[in-house]
Image (cartoon, grey):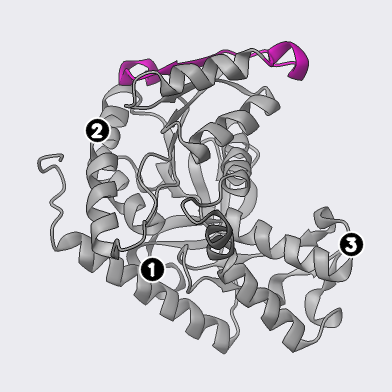
Amino acid sequence: MKKVSVIGAGNVGATTVYYIAEKNIADIVMVDVAEGLAQKKALDFLHSATLRSYNISITGTSDYREIRDSDVVVVTAGVPRKPGMDRMDLLKINVAIVTGASRYIAEYCPDAVVIVVTNPLDVIAMVVLRETGFAIKKVVGMAGALDSTRFRYFIAEKLGVWPGDVMAMVLGGHGDEMVPLKNYTSVGGIPLPQLLDDDSIEGMIRRTRDGGGEIVKYLKTGSAFYAPGASVAKMVESVIKDEKRLMAASAYLRGEYGYHNIFLGVPALLGKNGIEKIINIELAPEEKKALDASAEAVREGIRMLESFYVPGGESQ
């Protein structure tokens, strides 16, 4: 049986575990530094095994040694941005948390594929890459998978069609500058621009960019976790089963699309080795301009990171 470890037993981590368990594809270890939290949630999941037909083990622990020999490690540990907290405050806290987790990943499961969820996602993925020393294909960020599923749903809602018939691609950083591609979006094979006018499409693009913020406004003190958890589980499944699914994912770029040394959401084949291949697609001038702006936003985050972070330095 394959093995997946999820670092962080908060809402996103626990929901991710739930969706992976439903797929019956791997044994699961959930790790959290809060004593008893992961243990409690793992036991609660197992109590539903007879009803949901789980045929896997789910372990909760505070001991990183339990992640040993994992095939996939999902990093959700971190804190959400709170009122009054600026981007630098959030970045420093989450970098410290992820730095420690990354070193344990490198020690106990050096052959794993790591899927990064902690925000700011594209910048945190850089920290994971540097701290683990893994091959660049082995570290991937969950960005476009979530953003694309939101875009797909909004389109299906607007047209009154089955959401599974909508295919969409959202590139760029996981933030306000993400780039939904209307020219690579279709419903039952019909290009989206043939089904909706430009104003309607632009409205759904705006709502996709604001999708996470819309949920935060309702929750006040929290953020989304069902759609993020489902998105991560889909990525995990593609790796565990070596499905080589084509989806948008945050990958380390070395010249693709004209960008170097940053993580950015691009079309990629996801399989047992992580990012099996980055797919280059032709972008319209306005799409490339938007992607440039998104890449610059990620670079700004990296500049913030490098103002205080030294790879291999002391973990806070």
Mark 1–mark 2 contact, CB under 8 Å? no
Report how far apart the C-alphas of labels 1 and 2 lie in the structure.
Answer: 28 Å
Q: Give the secondary structure at mark 3.
A: loop
Nearer the observer, 243 or 204:
204
Quadrant where the N terminus is found in the figure: top right
| Residue 263 appears in the rendering | yes
Residue placed under numbered mark 2 in the picture = 103
Residue placed under numbered mark 1 in the picture = 255
In the rendered image, the vertical position of residue 298 relative to residue 193, given as above or below: above
In the rendered image, the vertical position of residue 205 relative to residue 250, given as above or below: below
Query: Left of 115 or right of it: where is 85?
Result: left
Q: Residue at x 33, y 57 (%)?
A: 123
Query: Left of 182 or right of it: where is 92?
Result: left
Q: Give the secondary structure at mark 2.
A: helix
Quadrant where the C terminus is found in the figure: top left
Nearer the observer, 148 or 77:
77
On residue 247, which mark appears? none
On residue 161, which mark appears? 3
The x and y percentages for residue 315 are 15, 39
For badge 2, the amino acid type reads Arg
The x and y percentages for residue 231 are 61, 46
* Region rendered in magenta: 48-69
The x and y percentages for residue 98 are 29, 41
Q: Earlier in the sequence, mark 1 or mark 2?
A: 2
Q: Give the secondary structure at mark 1.
A: loop
Query: Is residue 65 rendered magenta in the image?
Result: yes
Report how far apart the C-alphas of labels 2 and 3 lie in the structure.
Answer: 46 Å
Mark 2 Cα shell of 10 Å, populated few (<14), some (14-19), many (≥20)? some
